[in-house]
Amino acid sequence: MSRRDTLMLMTQKPLTVCDLLLRWVLVAGTLLLPQQLLAAGRSEGQPNIIFIMVDDMGYADLGCYGSQAIKTPHIDRMAAEGVRFTDAYSGSAVCAPARCALMTGKHTGHTSVRGNTGGIPLEESDLTIAEVLKEAGYRTGGFGKWGLGDIGTSGAPEKQGFDLFFGYYHQIHAHNYYPEYLVRNGKKVPISGDGEEGYSPYLIFKEMRAFIRENRDRPFFCYAPWTPPHGMYQIPVSDPALRLYGDLEGNAKIIAAMNSMIDAQVGEIMELLQELDIDDNTVIFFCSDNGAAERFDDVLDSSGPLRGEKGTMYEGGIRVPMIVRWPGRLNAGTTSHLPWYFPDLLPTLAAIGGAGEFVPTDVDGISVAPTLTGDGRQAERECLYWEWPRYDWSTKTYERDGLMQAVRCGRWKMLRHRGDEPWQLYDLSRDIGEGSDIADTHPGVVERLTSWIASNRHDPSPQNEPEMPKGKKFR
């Protein structure tokens, strides 16, 4: 029962003096529970939750997903000690809509943020993962790129359930790894230096480690939307990861090194959890926010067998690596082929964290906790859905008939990259590379999926950037 429900129940009948005293005790206790009482301990079965989401890592950029070029021993160890998913998907083919789907549990036919201009804010009515877990007593921290509301807007993370957020608010700001400032809870923190001391991934990682240390004695949700390996492609020349790729050149070398830097930081997090003696009570998720920005075919082969890359509705744009590790609670070293995606994370984390009663009734996602833990029966769904409106940066307008859409229902995947194009249909059970469009030979499937889309989306609210300082792209 939420604090709001408790207050409502206590106003249903005339109150005696005893009732008033009891009411005061109940209200005080309820209001204190998340902040004070849980600070001294945690409720039975509440694990710490760390959700690491990197930016633009391809489906096949990890050793455990088949990479022959990039060295990722720590993340590969995560997979060996946890569950690796083959059919996990982002919420979108690009940054902001994907993050909105993740945070709200809704697919992009229902989310408030569908454009990808960088600062479209969540609405006040949106309920996020952080708010849901906070109701259950979690301390909530975010470290990296937010992308769902600039400073002073309704979407700012401190207004959306985060006790602490450190990093970038506007995603265009996040394009620079040596920024003039980062943001902590709406306040700018000056940054200087052009070497290790000014490199934002190091600074953000340091803050994340501190958050974990400070909250080791209470349940915490640590959201880590790290910015690498998104372009601009930059890494300090002193980073050891660069020495692993002397045979590569250009952006491929830097991206490979950034991915190995990420891997090293994942290893440090796992070591920290062991040092703090909270490893067995911490579940770690690792994924990418969408597909690879560049495929680097015959060099890195970042998309592997998948067609497309970031910004497309082909599998290479939306299918992502997803690994979950929780010592003693998951069947270590297993591979799951369950199709699931970012909208499922809110109900899943709520189930894991004992916050199921706070999940909104209008989410599109389902909990995949039964698949992770083996407890209970996994709920089934009919379809997964994605959409994203094309944006013309030269005119700063959304393109007419520019709506990109995709739907997966079982083995069937249907997509189009413009509203005035015909649908493409693929049978993923036979054609993971989406090489043979079979829409003409399966009109009944196309008709059924088209009808499902029409019944399961609505037009978005205006997708506008907030007012910016003159000459600035972000605040």
Image (tube, helix red, strand yellow):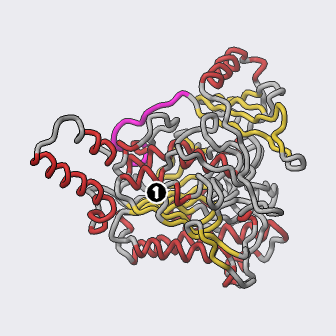
Count of numbered marks: 1
Residue 377 magenta-drawn? yes
Residue 243, magenta (yes or no): no
Is 193 located above or below residue 234 in the figure? below
Q: Residue at x 70, y 29 (%)?
A: 414
Q: Amino acid at mark 1?
A: Gly
**In which quadrant of the rendered image does the N terminus lie?**
top left
| Front in this rendered view, residue 297 or 30 | 30
Q: Quadrant of residue 169?
A: bottom right
In which quadrant of the rendered view does residue 253 lie?
Answer: bottom right
**Residue 198, image x and y in percent?**
69, 81
Image vertical order of residue 352 relative to residue 180, above or below: above
Q: Residue 145's quadrant in the figure?
A: bottom right
Q: Residue at x 76, y 22 (%)?
A: 439
Does residue 337 show up? no
Towards the viewer: 396 or 57? 396
Q: Which residues are magenta?
A: 371-382
Magenta: main secondary structure = loop
* Left or right for 7, reference 191: left
